[in-house]
Image: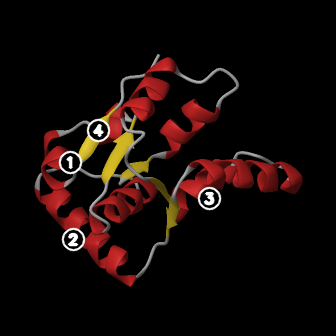
Amino acid sequence: MILLDNNIVRKYSARNPDPHVVEYLAAHYDQPWGISAIVLYEFLSYYEEQSTQRRRHNQLTDVVDDVLAFDEATAVEAASMESSLATAGVSLDAADLLIAATAQQHGATLATADTNDFDKTPVHELLDLDIVTTS
């Protein structure tokens, strides 16, 4: 499974989708796509009107195969990852850590365009990660 980070979802669902994201997703069309419940929250919270939130929710869940919940096992994974990263002198903000732990817990590849936070050797060592270079 490919777990999509919020920046990938945003760049794909934009009025003019990022061609690099489209190319990446086309190359992985044969794999299931998922998002974490945290990404769903981040994506929907951008829209102020509830009617827009409902419409965008339906559009997004039509595209992805699964929305993965944050549960007890994922919380334990997040704590373990946070400790490992801290030992290496690296940290992720809470949302990024929970999204990464969701990917790890479900054996998914995390697809992100967030090079500032994720494109670090200790993160690559802990996580199956695809960094998508965007326009």
- Image quadrant for the N terminus? bottom left
Q: Residue 101: horizontal and vertical position, in percent?
A: 32, 63
Dot 4 or dot 2, earlier in sequence: 2
Helix, strand or loop for disc 2: helix
Colour convention of the picture = secondary structure
Q: Residue 109: horizontal and vertical position, in percent?
A: 30, 50
Residue at 11% in and 52% down: 88
In the image, farthest residue toward the bottom: 72
Give the residue type at disc 3.
Tyr
- In this view, 68 is above or below 51: below
- In this view, 98 is above or below 58: below
Helix, strand or loop for disc 1: helix
Q: Residue 7, which numbered label? A: none
Give the residue type at disc 1.
Val
Residue on which disc 4 sits: 130
Helix, strand or loop for disc 3: helix
Q: Residue 130: horizontal and vertical position, in percent?
A: 29, 38
C-alpha gap between disc 4 and disc 2: 21 Å
Dot 2 or dot 1, earlier in sequence: 2
Horizontal side, residue 88 vs residue 130: left or right = left
Q: Residue 41, which numbered label? A: 3
Horizontal side, residue 129 vs residue 121: left or right = right
Dot 1 or dot 3, earlier in sequence: 3
Dot 4 or dot 3, earlier in sequence: 3
Contact check, label 2 and label 3, Cβ < 8 Å: no
Residue at 38% in and 44% down: 30
Residue on which disc 1 sits: 123
C-alpha gap between disc 4 and disc 3: 22 Å
Residue on which disc 2 sits: 80
Q: How many marks?
A: 4
